[in-house]
Image (cartoon, grey):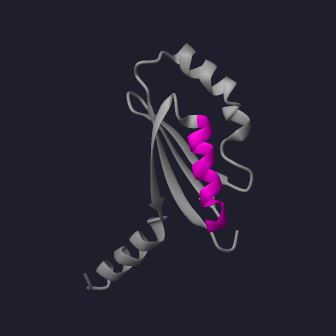
């Protein structure tokens, strides 16, 4: 994708539901086929015990509304969602590191 953005989605578990309830809901909503929407790339997908799932996605800006609708359609009911624009800090860190090595701040 030439023009893309990173979005990190925090899927917080609804702790009033057990795993069986969550999986049933996700199956009914066809979660595993619908999320992420077509054209959206999964960069990372991490489980944080006691919190939920942290998903970083790469997508063209034009698919942001589609991502939003799919979260509303499929995730709500088992997760509360938080969505954050994100960027890859590694190149920035390396630039700062090199600058500091050369006497800068």
Q: Which of these two is toward me, 51 or 21?
A: 21
Q: Position of residue 13 (x, y in %)?
A: 44, 29
Along the horizontal axis of the image, is 26 left or right of 78? right
Q: Main secondary structure of the magenta part?
A: helix
71 is within the stretch colored magenta: yes
67 is within the stretch colored magenta: yes
Along the horizontal axis of the image, is 35 left or right of 54? right
- Residues rendered magenta in the picture: 60-74
Q: Position of residue 44 (x, y in %)?
A: 57, 48
Q: Say which residue appears at 39% left-offset and 70% top-offset.
A: 93
Is residue 21 visible to the viewer in this orientation of the structure?
yes
Q: Which of these two is toward me, 51 or 98?
A: 51
Q: Which of these two is toward me, 91 or 69?
A: 69
Q: Say which residue appears at 73% left-offset and 56% top-offset.
A: 39
Along the horizontal axis of the image, is 71 left or right of 83? right
Q: Say which residue appears at 32% left-offset and 85% top-offset.
A: 102
Q: Position of residue 92 (x, y in %)?
A: 42, 73
Quadrant showing the N terminus: bottom right
Does 42 appear above or below 78? below
């Amino acid at each position: 994708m030439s023009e893309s953005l990173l979005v990190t989605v925090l899927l917080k578990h609804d702790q009033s539901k057990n795993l069986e309830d969550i999986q049933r809901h996700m199956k009914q909503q066809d979660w595993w086929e619908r999320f992420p929407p077509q054209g959206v790339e999964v960069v990372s997908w991490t489980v944080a015990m006691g919190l939920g799932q942290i998903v970083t996605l790469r997508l063209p800006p034009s698919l942001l509304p589609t991502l939003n609708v799919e979260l509303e359609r499929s995730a709500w009911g088992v997760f509360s969602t938080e969505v954050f624009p994100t960027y890859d800090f590694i190149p920035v860190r390396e630039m700062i590191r090199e600058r500091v090595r050369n006497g800068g701040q």
